[in-house]
Image (tube, rainbow, N blue to C red):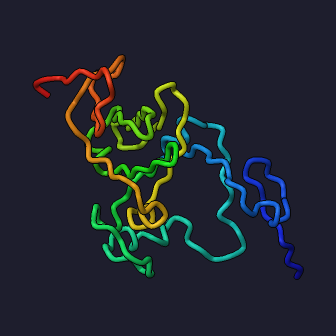
Amino acid sequence: MRFVNLAVSVSTAQAVPKFQLVGKQPRKLPSNRTSWKTWRKRHPDTLVLSTETGYYRDYSRDPYAGYYRVGMIWFPVGEVRKDLSPKERVIGIEVKNRTRAYPLAQLQEKPGITADSLGGESIHIEVSAEGEVVKVKDGRGGEIPHIYAYWFAWQAFHPDTTVYRGGECYALGSIRYATYSVIPEGAKRLSGI
């Protein structure tokens, strides 16, 4: 067996010598996390790899099911900020070197569009009635790369991150009911909500 010092470029799917990547900032790509039901609806021609791999493994069973339910972390991660529970699931967003964690449970409580501002940019997070994050876009409609993570992991890599706390409801342009943690200029407070 021969080991080669190569990495695979995600953007070009070509192998490149690792030393060429030293000091380079990889481009962030938008990603999606969705249920199989939603995926099949959007992409009916999707093919799935066979579970007949030659090895015994029950692919219908999630090997991390217990990890999701248990509050403790199974490995050392250093100091964990107390803003959220360590295993609170968040969507992490970085815009112009500013980072914010959006607690997934909070977003799922109010399906629709949650609007916010980070690094001077508008952010719109769309959540379906089923609780799936459908899109994360900027004010111009462009996709914003985001990551699903546990709070302990997100804050470890982004120690200066802020946490989205929601706020009062405001109307701005075509977004009629939105929750802002930072009120955008020109937004009008909606009363009685």
Residue that extends furthest to the right in the rendered view of this protein: 2
> Considering the image in quadrants, where does the C terminus appear?
top left
Up-down relation of residue 53 to residue 110 (above or below) = below
Based on the displayed image, in which of its 4 quarters is residue 191 positioned? Answer: top left
Residue depicted at x 68% and y 76%: 55
Residue 35 visible in image: no
Q: In this orientation, which residue lies closer to the viewer: 54 or 69?
A: 69
Q: Position of residue 134 (x, y in %)?
A: 45, 38
Q: Residue furthest left?
A: 192
Residue 2 shows up from this direction: yes
Q: Is residue 3 left or right of residue 186?
A: right
Q: How many marks?
A: 0
Taking depth in this image into account, of 185 and 125 the one nearest to the observer is 185
Q: Residue 25 sits in which quadrant?
A: bottom right
Q: Is residue 84 left or right of residue 40?
A: left
Question: Which is more toward the observer, 137 or 49?
Answer: 137
Name the residue at 48% across, 67% down. Answer: 62
Q: Residue at x 60, y 37 (%)?
A: 43
Q: Check the image and report above or below for 29 versus 15.
A: above
**Which residue lies at the image location 27% right of the left edge and 38% below the top edge?**
110
**As displayed, is residue 29 above or below residue 83?**
above
Quarter of the image containing the N terminus? bottom right
Q: In which image quadrant can residue 70 be found?
A: bottom left
Residue placed farthest to the top in the image? 173
Give the x, y percent position of residue 133. 42, 42
Residue 108 lies left or right of residue 11; in this view the side is left
